Amino acid sequence: MVGSDFAGMSRLSLLPAELRRSLEQHSTLKVIAGLMNFDPTIVAMVASASGLGGADLLDVACDSELVKLAIASSGGVPVCVSAVDPELFPAAVDAGAAMVEIGNYDAFYPQGRIFDAPEVLAITRRTRQLLPDVVMSVTVPHILPMDQQEVLAVALVAAGADLIQTEGGTSAKPASPGSLGLIEKAAPTLAAAYSITAALQQSESAVPVLCASGLSSVTAPMAIAAGASGVGVGSAVNRLDDELSMTAAVRALREALGSPVKSRV
C-alpha cells in the first residue's frame, strides 16, 4: 500500500496539500466531466457540483478556457485535464491545471480507436518531455490482458507517470438490476486496480492508483479495498440532468469513501 511517504516524491509534492493528503489516506474522489465534453454549461455544472459535494479533483477536457471555468465554478477544486495528444497539455497547464491525465480511452472505443501499449508509452514519454515538472497520470487500456496491463503500468512509471489510472466500464456487461448490477459493472476496473497495485508494489515502483470507469457509490469503497488511492467517477455524475442531482451524487460518493463532505462553494 502506498504510504504517507510518497509525498516526498518530487512531482507529487507539487500537488495541493489537501489533494496530496487524500491520496495518502486512500480517499481521493475525482469527478470526471468527460474527455470529449467541451460544453461549458455542463462543465460548469459538474464543476460546481464537485465543489459543493466535496470532490478532491476535477477532471475536464484539455482546453484552457474550460480549465479556467472549472476552477472558478468549483470554488478552487484542483483541476486535471485529460487528452491523448501531448501537445495540448502545456496550454492547459498554463491556464491553471494542477495535473494532466493521458486517457481515459472509453470515449474512443465506440469509434474503433484502440490504444496499445507502445502508443500509450510513446504518449507518456512525449508528455514528460514537454512537461518535466508537472504531475502526470496515465490510464492503462483495459483492452489489454491483465498481465499486460500490469507490465505496462510498471513501464509507465519508469517512463515518468506519477499516478496510474484503471478503466473497464465499457467492457462490462451487467446482467442484474440494482446493487448487483453496479458491482458487475465495476468488476473489470476493480480487478485492474487490484492487479496493477500489486504489480507496482512488487516492482518497487509503487505510485498512487486511481480506479475509474463504471464506478458508483456502491462500488467506490471496493476500489479502495482493492488497493486504489482513490476513484474517478464520470457518468454517475456528468450524465445527470441538473446541478442539484449532480451535487447529491458527488456527496454520496464522498460519504461512501468515508470522508466528511467539505463544500468549497
Image (cartoon, helix red, strand yellow):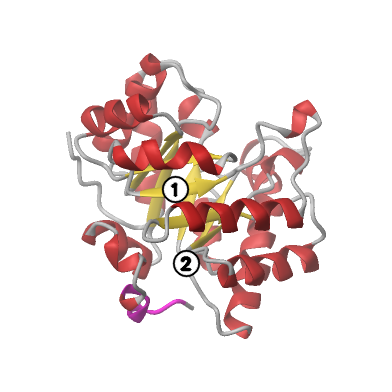
Which quadrant of the figure has residue 246? top left
Does residue 8 sit above or below 20 in this rendering? below
Sooner in the amino-acid sequence: mark 2 or mark 1: 1
Query: Tag 2: residue type?
Result: Pro
Q: Secondary structure at mark 2?
A: loop
Judge left or right: residue 191 versus residue 3: right
Numbered tag placed on residue 49 in the rendering: none
Mark 1: secondary structure: strand
For residue 208, the mark is 2
Q: Residue 92's spot in the image, x, y percent?
A: 37, 37
Residue 98 in sight here: yes
Question: Where residue 100 is drawn, which disc sits there?
Answer: 1
Is the Cβ of the residue at disc 2 closer than 8 Å to that at disc 1?
no
197 in relation to 61, above or below: below
The extreme front residue here reads 129
Residue visible at 51% across and 40% down? 87
The image quarter containing residue 66 is: top left
Residue at the spot x=28%, y=25% of the render?
Answer: 69
Relative horizontal placement of residue 203, taking residue 62 as reference (left or right): right
- Along the line of sight, which residue is nearer the eye, 90 or 172? 90
Q: Residues within 10 Å of mark 1 (few under 14, many from 20)?
A: many
Q: Which residues are magenta?
A: 2-7
Image quarter (top left, top right, bottom left or bottom right) of the C terminus: top left
Q: Amino acid at mark 1?
A: Val
Gap between marks 2 and 1 measured at Cα: 14 Å
The location of residue 70, given as percent across then percent down, is 31, 30
